[in-house]
Each structure stands twice: as structure tokens, then as C-alpha cells.
């Protein structure tokens, strides 16, 4: 799909590789073609922003990054029949209740489990139980559950910057619990780096070489 002079391609990236002339080859497999030979994309620059899976792509270049996932859950109650105007944090059980256009969302919990492990929906159900204690009159006829990943590093800082093994591969991941809040700042920094500009912030704490 072409967008503003660019091209959007939806595919699974299997690996990255340097070329002799300083470019990067991105090997991909498109949906429905699993098992076939990967397509190769020849790139001037690559940004790895694959969340909790990013270390697997970095490893194909030889960069070892101790990324782990802290998994979390939420439940959303559509048409709850209660209308708080603010986000409420019930501190002791560490649950957030957020009124949204699509309903009331209850979120929280940290689960240490692998990327491949099946969701443990009991955790989402426990959030709903707490939510019903917060709002006893809530209508729970329409409830949806979700599990997601928080990509985390041992020092709780993200990885932002160039690969030591390929100066035109840029890493942007590992924002843990604040990836949505951090995305705009990291996006600007990565855009500056790719454009060859001096970033507006000191990115030395975020380098891959700290591990
Ligand atoms: C319950 C919960 C509540 C949260 N609340 C907040 C909050 O209030 N505020 C906040 O700022 N953050 C919050 N977060 C954290 C936030 O969701 C994450 O930090 C953020 O989603 C990370 O964004 P990302 O783009 O790096 O990764 P993701 O959102 O995980 O996106 C990575 C994408 O890369 C794709 N991908 C991976 N590997 C490949 C591959 N090989 N080829 C192609 N595509 C690939 C994946 O399919 C995915 O679409 C919360 C997380 C959870 C779980």
C-alpha cells in the first residue's frame, strides 16, 4: 500500500543482515506464505521497533539484549451503567479503573511468563472481580478481556540508538510500562538519528553496549 510516497508492507521479519556495501537486508515472510523462502528487502536504514520481540531481531545481527516481557491484562466493561469522570487508582490491590468511550477498563497485574505462553485469563477475571467491588452496581453483561506485553530491560531503561554492529540499524524498544507515553519522544529521537542529526536528548544511557 502506498502512503504519502511511502510503501506499507505487512510481513513478518525473520532476520537482518549487513551487506558488504553497508546496507541492510531485511528478510521477511508475508502472511500466507509461511514456510516459503523469505522475501528480501534491501534497505538504507532499518528501525527495529518490534516491542517485546525486538531482541530476537537484534540477535540475528549478533546483538545480545536481555529483553523480557512483563505481561499484563485488562478487562473492558461496555455499557457499565456507572459514569466516573476520572481515572481511579485503588492503591492497595494496584488496579486502575479508566472510564473510556468504549466502556470502563480495569487494568493492572504483572505476570512473568514467556512470549509464547498462553494467556492466563484468571488474571483478567480477578481484575473484573476487583472492579465489581469498586462499582457494586456495575452492569457486567458485556465484558472483553485482553493480554499484552510490556517489553522490559533489567535497568528499566529502553534501548534507543544504533546497533554497534550495523550503524544503519536503529533500535527503539524496551519502554516497559510506559511505551505509549514514551513513543512520541523516542520516535522523534530515532527520526533525528536516521536523518543524521544530533538528537535533542543525550541518548548515551540507552545504548545497547550497556549490557
Ligand atoms: C496491561 C498493560 C497496561 C499498560 N498501560 C500503559 C499505560 O498506561 N501507559 C503507557 O505508556 N504504556 C502502557 N503499557 C505499556 C505499553 O503497552 C507498551 O510499552 C507498548 O505497547 C510497547 O510498544 P511497542 O510499539 O514497543 O511494542 P508493541 O505494541 O508490542 O508493538 C510491537 C509490534 O511489533 C510486531 N512484531 C514483533 N516481531 C515482529 C517481526 N519479527 N516482524 C514483524 N512484526 C513484528 C508485533 O506484532 C507488534 O505489532 C501497558 C501495557 C500493558 C500490558
Image (spheres, grey):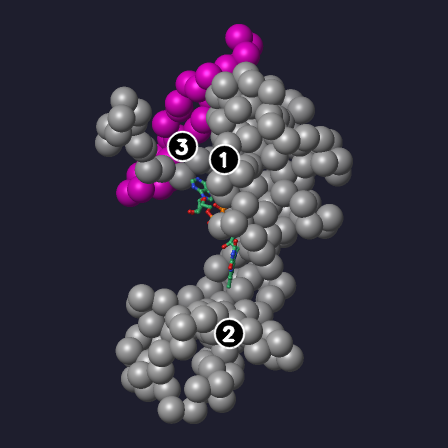
For marks 2 and 1, give the one nearer the viewer.
Answer: 2
Which residue is outermost to the front?
85
Spatial CA distance of label 2 from label 1 is 30 Å
Residue on which the image places disc 1: 187
**Dividing the image into 4 quarters, which one contains the C terminus?**
top right
Magenta region: which residues?
18-44
Q: Secondary structure at mark 3?
A: strand
**Dividing the image into 4 quarters, which one contains the N terminus?**
top left
* Along the viewing direction, whichever of 85 and 64 lies nearer the viewer: 85
Crowdedness near tag 1: few (<14), some (14–19) or many (≥20) residues, C-alpha within 10 Å: some
Which quadrant of the view contains residue 141? Answer: bottom left
Q: Position of residue 38 (x, y in %)?
A: 39, 30
Q: Position of residue 32 (x, y in %)?
A: 29, 43
Q: Between disc 1 and disc 3, whose residue precedes? A: 3
Residue on which the image places disc 3: 28
Q: Secondary structure at mark 1?
A: helix
* Along the viewing direction, whichever of 68 and 110 lies nearer the viewer: 110
Q: Position of residue 74 (x, y in %)?
A: 46, 69
Q: Residue at x 47, y 82 (%)?
A: 131
Q: Residue at x 57, y 33 (%)?
A: 171
34 up-or-down from 166: above or below: below
Crowdedness near tag 3: few (<14), some (14–19) or many (≥20) residues, C-alpha within 10 Å: some
Crowdedness near tag 2: few (<14), some (14–19) or many (≥20) residues, C-alpha within 10 Å: some
28 up-or-down from 112: above or below: above
Q: Position of residue 12 (x, y in %)?
A: 40, 39
Q: Residue at x 31, y 42 (%)?
A: 31
Spatial CA distance of label 3 from label 2 is 43 Å
Q: Are marks 3 and 2 in contact (CB under 8 Å)?
A: no
Residue on which the image places disc 2: 88
Spatial CA distance of label 1 from label 3 is 23 Å
Whether residue 16 is visible: no
Amino acid at each position: 500500500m502506498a502512503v504519502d510516497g511511502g510503501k506499507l508492507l505487512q510481513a513478518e521479519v525473520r532476520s537482518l543482515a549487513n551487506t558488504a556495501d553497508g546496507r541492510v537486508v531485511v528478510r521477511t515472510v508475508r502472511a500466507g506464505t509461511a514456510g516459503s523462502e523469505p522475501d528480501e528487502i534491501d534497505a538504507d536504514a532499518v528501525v527495529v521497533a518490534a516491542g517485546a520481540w525486538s531482541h530476537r531481531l537484534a540477535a540475528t545481527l549478533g546483538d545480545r539484549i536481555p529483553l523480557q516481557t512483563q505481561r499484563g491484562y485488562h478487562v473492558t466493561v461496555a455499557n457499565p451503567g456507572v459514569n466516573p469522570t476520572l481515572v481511579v487508582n485503588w492503591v492497595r490491590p494496584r488496579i486502575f479503573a479508566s472510564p473510556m468511550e468504549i466502556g470502563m477498563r480495569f487494568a493492572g497485574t504483572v505476570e512473568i511468563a514467556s512470549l509464547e505462553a498462553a494467556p492466563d485469563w484468571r488474571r483478567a477475571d480477578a481484575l473484573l472481580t476487583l472492579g465489581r467491588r469498586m462499582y457494586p452496581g456495575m452492569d457486567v453483561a458485556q465484558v472483553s478481556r485482553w493480554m499484552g506485553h510490556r517489553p522490559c530491560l533489567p535497568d528499566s531503561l529502553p534501548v534507543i540508538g544504533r546497533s554497534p554492529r550495523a550503524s544503519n540499524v536503529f533500535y527503539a524498544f524496551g519502554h516497559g510500562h510506559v511505551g505509549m507515553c514514551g513513543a512520541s519522544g523516542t520516535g522523534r529521537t530515532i527520526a533525528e538519528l536516521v536523518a543524521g542529526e544530533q538528537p535533542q536528548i543525550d541518548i548515551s544511557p540507552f545504548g545497547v553496549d550497556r549490557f
